[in-house]
Image (cartoon, rainbow, N blue to C red):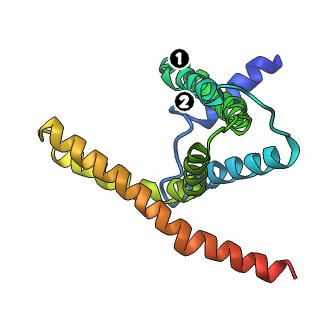
């Protein structure tokens, strides 16, 4: 059997739905998926920050946004008989494209004090929001599911409220948990 056929069979057997979702239930398979989804981005980011020197890219935000739009706007690849194609696409996007987006973003040039303050704030709250936001998404999704006939304006209002709450909780998590714990660890381990 040639290597490409072997790889395709392995991909077909690993994800019956052809995507990289999972990690939402407490069973062996879902825990493995969930831990992989948490561990890979953390260690990939750590590897990038320690081994790759950022460059100096003009319009980095624009290039990052365009690259993200391209990969996120591509519809599902394959059909029910070729689900592995979508899994392969999603895997390559996560392993290759997302680190490239991070590199481009880290290589951007920030010129003003205000721009620098905004970028620092967004960078500081990004991980706390990433860790805490999903509960609010579930609450909002449940509300939309229960109130499917609600007017669009009401759904939009609750969506905006969900967005604001996620930012506030992320900021509070940063200030009252993340920064104090990091400071404590720094004091404890840097002696």
Q: Is residue 19 above or below residue 141?
A: above
Q: Check the picture and name the quadrant holding the C terminus.
A: bottom right
- Determine the residue positioned at 74% across, 28% down: 57
Mark 1: which secondary structure? loop
Confirm whether residue 79 shows in the render.
yes
- Please count the marks in the image: 2
**Whole-percent x and y of residue 3?**
82, 20
Mark 1 and mark 2 in contact (Cβ < 8 Å)? yes
- Circle 2 is placed at which residue position? 18
- Circle 1 is placed at which residue position? 78
Q: Is residue 111 left or right of residue 147?
A: right
Give residue 106's quadrant in the image. top right
Q: Check the picture and name the quadrant holding the N terminus.
A: top right
- Determine the residue positioned at 63% across, 24% down: 63
Q: CA distance from mark 2 to mark 1?
A: 9 Å
Which circle's residue, 2 or 1, is located before the other in the chain? Answer: 2
């Amino acid at each position: 059997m040639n290597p490409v056929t072997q790889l395709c069979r392995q991909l077909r057997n690993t994800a019956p739905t052809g995507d990289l979702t999972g990690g939402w239930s407490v069973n062996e398979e879902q825990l493995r998926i969930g831990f992989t989804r948490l561990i890979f981005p953390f260690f990939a980011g750590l590897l990038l920050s320690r081994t790759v020197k950022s460059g100096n890219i003009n319009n980095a935000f624009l290039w990052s946004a365009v690259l993200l739009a391209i990969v996120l706007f591509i519809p599902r690849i394959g059909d029910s008989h070729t689900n592995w194609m979508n899994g392969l696409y999603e895997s390559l996007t996560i392993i290759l494209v997302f680190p490239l987006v991070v590199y481009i973003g880290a290589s951007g040039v920030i010129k003003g004090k205000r721009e620098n303050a905004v970028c620092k704030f967004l960078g500081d709250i990004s991980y706390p929001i990433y860790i805490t936001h999903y509960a609010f998404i579930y609450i909002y999704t449940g509300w939309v599911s229960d109130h499917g006939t609600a007017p669009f304006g009401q759904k939009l209002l609750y969506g905006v409220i969900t967005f604001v709450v996620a930012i506030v909780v992320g900021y509070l998590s940063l200030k009252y948990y993340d920064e104090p714990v990091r400071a404590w660890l720094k004091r404890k381990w840097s002696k």
